[in-house]
Image (cartoon, rainbow, N blue to C red):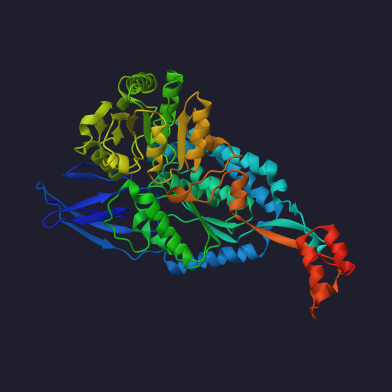
């Protein structure tokens, strides 16, 4: 028997099963085998833990843990929020000049540290550079460019109509910043989905705290360093960490929370939830409820971008080659299916399914080669926990024999090949949970319109897709399916259009952001009415006489003729 003491050791949980204990963790550290542990810890962390492991050749692994007192607690968080509120009250974040300076700093940060961003994304997800540029870096650059171009227009008060009751008067809607806001971001697009909401908060004039995901530790650490170097620390901060840090942040009073932390495997533990919670994909609504429960204590408004099972309905009249490529683009090209808007399952007719499967098989080979496991153009699975969850979905007795394409896996390298299933049972976990990975079930129906009932039998998804040349079917789909967003004859590209809001409905989320919608999400729309001291009629004040009542009814009911009659002492009553 040998022993090994490692310090620091983070992101672990111990599951006690009686005579046997096992250790699981979500981190980039690697273990070689049961006799030896080689650990590559991430950069500095706010929590330090000492782990003593006794390693032997037997199947039993006694584990002893000694956890040092965490350095980031509720008191420190309260002090952070106080500092940000004090900075906000000075008024500097409200100025156009400050907002522009921070946006230009983010723009400069992305240009100067682009290589570092690529490296962090590769460490966390093995994300191909092409994919990292398109879905992360370019998206942030585009958001900065649009905000700098449109900010003056967004900040300008909107004129509003007034009514006869307030004549003479004028009115406007003023967009004012909320104050100190909290952004809790995700691991699957750990750069873009961290920085883009922060851009929205800054354009609206808020002081902001970003809590990046600990599941993408390289990107989290990089964001902390970059924000410290490029942005105004008195008003924009990053808090790294795990369960204690997130819990401490949520216990504070914020002026708004935005949560994009879809399927973050440590997040279910926050707010006194058990560390032994099973990591499954049906958690997004549950995590949303946790966030809302914490926010409700302070009446904090929230934007929740959660997820769901995003369907793609494919008619038989489509261009099959183009459709197959766009399905591949909306499934395996987006972080290997680890995206909240990726295609979760396909619905098509029984007759068309074989042709579709053949086209997808050929398309996968064209994109990722004859052995996708060796492709450098596809991301790996984010963690061993996520890999195990996906593996259990594949191995369920109801579906393991339904695989028609793919199925290869490598747990050591956290890789799963693009895998297609045909007609898995509706009560299988594959069709009950959000998959969030490279597994794609195809469900067949007799008539393509039958797909609508199947979609509507499930919670509302974050996105829904339809491929068809039939205009009547397009209109029917748009009118009949409720989802956060939708694309016809393509997948995922709707989120690149900044003039469209991105957000969920029902269990897929609430609120929206992107472009002007981000500015609005972090702003309060203040109604302002302007009046002079002239035109002050005695009709509105006591004593209330029959004549005043007739006149006020005429004014409020509208119609100049009724007002004239009332002024003359006449009435239609």
The residue located at (31%, 55%) in the rendering is 8
In the orientation shown, which residue stands out farthest toward the right?
A: 568
Q: Nearer the viewer, residue 260 or 212?
A: 260
Picture quarter with the C terminus: bottom right
Q: Indicate the quadrant where residue 85 lies.
A: bottom right
Q: Which of 299 and 461 is in front in this view?
A: 461
The residue located at (32%, 61%) in the rendering is 273
Q: Can residue 41 be seen in this view?
A: no
76 on left or right of 169: left
**Place of residue 563 in the rendered image (x, y in percent of width and height, measured from the top left):** 84, 63
The residue located at (25%, 32%) in the rendering is 409
**Place of residue 30 in the rendered image (x, y in percent of width and height, measured from the top left):** 27, 42
75 on left or right of 499: left
Q: Indicate the quadrant where residue 323 lies.
A: top left
Q: Is residue 525 visible?
A: yes
Q: Nearer the viewer, residue 494 or 539?
A: 539
**Place of residue 304 in the rendered image (x, y in percent of width and height, measured from the top left):** 48, 52
Q: Nearer the viewer, residue 208 or 496?
A: 496
**Place of residue 145 in the rendered image (x, y in percent of width and height, measured from the top left):** 64, 39
Q: How many labels does the image show?
A: 0
In the orientation shown, which residue stands out farthest toward the left?
A: 58
Decide: is 194 above or below 75: above
In the orientation shown, which residue stands out farthest toward the front?
A: 573
Decide: is 194 above or below 542: above
């Amino acid at each position: 028997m040998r022993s090994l003491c490692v310090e620091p050791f983070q992101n672990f949980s111990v599951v006690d099963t009686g005579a046997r204990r096992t250790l699981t963790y979500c981190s980039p550290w690697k273990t070689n085998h049961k006799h030896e542990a080689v650990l590559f810890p991430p950069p500095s962390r706010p929590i330090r833990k000492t782990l003593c492991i006794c390693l032997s050749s037997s199947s039993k692994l006694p584990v002893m843990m000694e956890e040092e007192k965490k350095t980031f607690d509720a008191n420190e968080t309260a002090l952070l929020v106080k500092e940000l509120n004090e900075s906000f009250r000075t008024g500097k974040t409200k100025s156009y000049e400050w907002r522009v300076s921070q946006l230009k700093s983010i723009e400069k940060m992305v240009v100067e540290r682009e290589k570092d961003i690529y490296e962090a994304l590769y460490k966390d997800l093995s994300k191909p550079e092409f994919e990292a540029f398109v879905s992360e870096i370019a998206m942030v650059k585009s958001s900065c460019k649009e905000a700098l171009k449109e900010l003056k227009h967004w900040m300008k008060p909107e004129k509003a109509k007034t009514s006869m009751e307030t004549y003479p008067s004028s009115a406007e809607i003023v967009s004012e910043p909320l104050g100190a806001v909290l952004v809790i971001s995700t691991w699957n697009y750990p750069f873009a989905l961290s920085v883009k909401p922060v851009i929205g908060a800054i354009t609206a004039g808020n002081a902001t705290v970003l809590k990046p995901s600990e599941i993408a530790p390289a990107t989290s650490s990089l964001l902390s360093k970059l924000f410290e170097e490029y942005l105004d620390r008195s008003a924009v901060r990053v808090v790294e960490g795990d369960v204690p840090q997130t819990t401490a942040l949520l216990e504070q009073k914020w002026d708004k929370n935005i949560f994009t932390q879809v399927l973050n495997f440590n997040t279910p533990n926050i707010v006194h939830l058990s560390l032994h919670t099973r990591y499954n994909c049906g958690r997004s609504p549950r995590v949303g409820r946790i966030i809302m429960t914490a926010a409700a204590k302070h009446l904090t408004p929230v934007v929740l971008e959660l997820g769901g099972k995003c369907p793609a309905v494919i008619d038989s009249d489509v261009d099959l080659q183009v459709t197959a490529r766009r399905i591949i683009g909306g499934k395996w090209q987006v972080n290997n299916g680890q995206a909240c808007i990726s295609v979760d399952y396909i619905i098509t007719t029984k007759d068309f399914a074989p042709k579709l499967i053949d086209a997808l098989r050929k398309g996968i080979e064209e994109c990722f080669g004859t052995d996708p496991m060796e492709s450098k153009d596809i991301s790996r699975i984010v963690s061993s926990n996520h890999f195990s969850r996906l593996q259990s979905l594949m191995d369920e007795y109801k579906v393991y024999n339904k695989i028609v394409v793919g199925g290869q896996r490598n747990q050591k390298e956290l890789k799963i090949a693009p895998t297609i299933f045909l007609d898995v049972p509706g009560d299988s976990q594959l069709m009950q949970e959000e998959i969030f990975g490279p597994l794609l079930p195809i469900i067949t129906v007799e008539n393509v319109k039958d797909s609508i009932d199947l979609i509507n039998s499930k919670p509302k998804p974050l996105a829904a897709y339809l491929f068809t040349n039939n205009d009547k079917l397009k209109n029917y789909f748009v009118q009949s399916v409720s989802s956060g967003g939708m694309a016809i004859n393509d997948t995922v590209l709707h989120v690149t259009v900044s003039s469209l809001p991105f957000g969920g409905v029902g269990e897929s989320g609430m609120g929206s952001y992107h472009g002007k919608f981000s500015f609005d999400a972090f702003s309060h729309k203040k109604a302002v009415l302007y009046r002079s001291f002239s035109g002050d009629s005695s009709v509105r004040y006591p004593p209330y006489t029959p004549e005043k009542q007739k006149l006020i009814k005429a004014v409020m009911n509208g119609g100049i003729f009724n007002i004239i009659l009332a002024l003359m002492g006449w009435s239609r009553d």
